[in-house]
Amino acid sequence: MTTNVDDGAGARALDDAAAREVRRRLEEEQRSRAAQLAVLEKAVEQTPLEQVEASDYTRMDNLRHSLAEIDDALRRLEEGTYGRCEGCGQTIPAGRLEILPYVRYCVRCQGRGTR
Ligand SMILES: [Zn+2]
């Protein structure tokens, strides 16, 4: 994918085709995580409380967290702010977004511990 994005102020980080592709990927992730969460919730519900593993709660938490992040990424996509680092305002490189489609920060800001 060659998306040469200029870093001009106020410029959208993605063109329409790229935005559609990102939306498709995010929605796919959303579906698969929502399905995993539903399965896990159901399993936990049917398990006596003292037998539920702490790791099950951790996994559910992680899934809920991802789902919230995906929701937010979809909102940013809608607003045209998607792909822009929330720390420094720079465009996040397309390669990073490809690996982590709902990431909020560039590598530098993430490394700084901005969360
Ligand atoms: Zn940044």
Image (cartoon, helix red, strand yellow):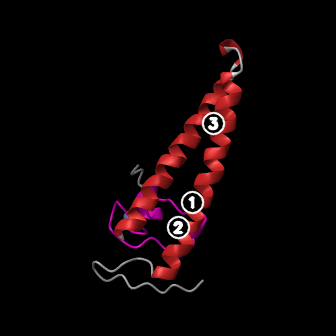
Evaluate if marks 2 and 1 touch, with contact meaning CB atoms under 8 Å apart: yes
Please state which amino acid type lies under the numbered disc 3.
Arg
Element type where label 3 sits in the image:
helix
Can the viewer see residue 62 in this picture?
yes
Residue bearing mark 2:
23
Q: CA distance from mark 3 to mark 2?
A: 24 Å
User: As displayed, is residue 12 above or below residue 70?
Assistant: below
Looking at the image, residue 103 sits to the left or right of residue 11; the answer is: right
Q: Nearer the viewer, residue 99 or 69?
A: 69
The front one of 78 and 115 is 78
Mark nearest the camera among 3 and 2 is 2
Element on which disc 1 rests: helix
- Identify the residue at image location x=48%, y=63%: 107
Residue at which label 1 appears: 27
Give the magenta-colored segment's residue range.
Answer: 82-111
Name the residue that disc number 3 marks. Answer: 59
